[in-house]
Image: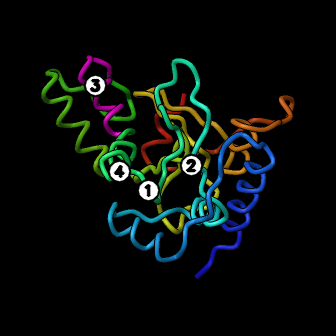
Amino acid sequence: MIDFDGAWLGSQAARRLAEADCCEIAPGLTEKEFSRIEATYELEFSPEHRAFLAAGLPVASPPEEGATWQQPWPDWRHADEDDLRHRLEWPVREVLGDVAHGNWHPALGARPTSKEEALKVARAVLARAPRLVPVYAHRFIPAGRDTPGHPVLSVWGTDIICYGHDLADYIDREFGEFDEDAPWNPQASVPLWKDFLG
């Protein structure tokens, strides 16, 4: 079944990215490629992310000085499997990194007394969280066919913020033009991840 709202959001995001003329865009992913990727990485793209990547696959951006990512767009077609797994594991790894350095976020529950127990509890909590899929660098959208319209999240350790009301709004904010006076009240609804938002 096609989710037309998700498909519409994805096509709008793809159109806006093309208009921003900020990166190279390869032909979109085929159904066969989506099937291979989803089977290999045990995920389902959200309806809007799937429509976005089907319309055109962003593959290259000029590297920014001091950037964390040499190539911020995940290349779902040609990237090394380890690279894509690294990107997919980023949100959990980042939160666990903060916990390992003694930081604890209330979204993880009651803080254990030892570092080892804190890591164990955090791993268990994060294992139950919905999977986040990379869109660009450390910007993520929830996986799942039944998850259209979620905000795009920026994940850096436990510093997690909304970076767009949805995928189309995110593309405008990151690469295009947007009305800075427009209302800004994204409603994150992803279990656990929404609890990190301040």
Tag 3 or tag 2, which sits nearer the N-term?
2
| CB-based contact (under 8 Å), mark 4 and mark 2 | no
Tag 2 and tag 1, C-beta contact below 8 Å: yes
Query: Distance of mark 1 from mark 3, alpha carbons?
Result: 33 Å
Q: Nearer the viewer, mark 1 or mark 3?
A: 1
The residue at the point 47 percent across, 38 percent down is: 195
Q: Nearer the viewer, residue 173 or 69?
A: 69
**Which residue is at 44% across, 49% downward?**
132
Amino acid at circle 1: His
Query: Going by the image, does 11 lie left or right of 46?
Result: right
Measure the alpha-carbon separation of dots 4 and 3.
29 Å
> What residue is shown at x 65% (from left), y 47% (from top)?
24
Give whichever of discs 2 and 1 has the lower sequence position.
Answer: 2
Q: Which residue is mark 3?
A: 99
**Image position of 33 (left or right of 120):** right
Which quadrant holds residue 157? top left
* Foreground pick, 20 / 60: 60
Q: Residues within 10 Å of mark 1 (few under 14, many from 20)?
A: few
How crowded pointer 4 is (Cα within 10 Å; few <14, some 14-19, many 20+) is rated as few
Q: Amino acid at mark 2?
A: Val
Q: Is residue 59 left or right of residue 16?
A: left
Q: Amino acid at mark 3?
A: Val
Nearer to us: label 2 or label 3: 2
Q: CA distance from mark 2 to mark 3?
A: 33 Å
Residue 78, labelled with which disc? 1
**Left or right side of 174 for 141:** left
Q: CA distance from mark 4 to mark 2?
A: 13 Å
Residue 176 x %, y %:
78, 38
Span shown in magenta: 92-103
User: Which image quarter holds the N terminus?
Assistant: bottom right
Q: Is residue 112 magenta?
A: no
Q: Secondary structure at mark 1?
A: loop
